[in-house]
Amino acid sequence: MSEISDKNKEIVREIFEKIVNGGDADLAAKFYKGDYIQHNPNVPQGLAGLQGLIRGMHASGDPMHAEIVLMNAEDDRVWLLIEWSGGTLPPGMPRLTHTAEIFRVEDGMMAEHWDVLQFASADN
């Protein structure tokens, strides 16, 4: 694995620890480009959209938590398998259980993101 791949993995791990799990939406400006491209149609584009999502995830007393199960990288791409837990959901809403995430890193900052989501049934 290249030095760039290793560095990009460290950046993504820090993002999940401090921003996704830690809830520090303002810190995202250090790691995400302002014109960050989000390929999930349910999440707004850009840094501001991401910050809104993070703030929403941590608005309740029981925020969701991401555990990195697998991570790998090649050059400017980092991909992960995430297991999600926690979070308070409205009745009947399906629970997010796992995601596959791909990030493109540009000059040490997140430039682009793709994800695939797996949900449990609303009854679980």
Image: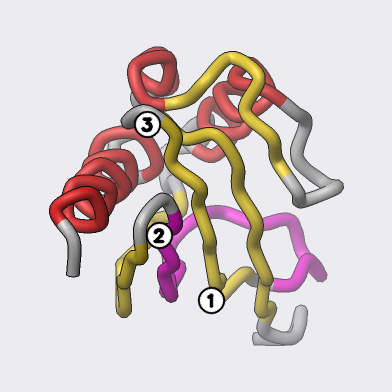
Q: Position of residue 116 (x, y in %)?
A: 67, 70
**Residue placed under numbered mark 1 in the picture:** 98
Q: Is residue 30 left or right of residue 48?
A: left
On whether residue 60 falls in the magenta region, the answer is no
The quarter in which the N terminus is drawn is bottom left
> For the residue marked with disc 1, what is the amino acid?
His
Earlier-in-chain disc, 3 versus 1:
3
N-terminal of the two: label 2 or label 1?
2
Does label 2 or label 3 sit earlier along the sequence?
A: 3
The image quarter in which residue 75 lies: bottom left
Q: Examine the rendered structure and indicate whether residue 41 appears above or below residue 68.
A: above
Q: Secondary structure at mark 1?
A: strand
Viewer-closest of 116 and 18? 116
Question: Which residue bears the numbered disc 3?
Answer: 23
Q: Amino acid at mark 3?
A: Gly
Q: Position of residue 61 (x, y in %)?
A: 42, 38
- Eyeballing the image, is 54 above or below 12? above
Q: Position of residue 27 (x, y in %)?
A: 34, 18
Instruction: From the viewer's perspective, tell me whether residue 68 is left or right of residue 32.
Output: left
Q: Secondary structure at mark 3?
A: loop
User: Which image quadrant: the C terminus?
Assistant: bottom right
Task: Give the residue pinned by disc 2.
Answer: 78
Q: Are marks 2 and 1 in contact (CB under 8 Å)?
A: no
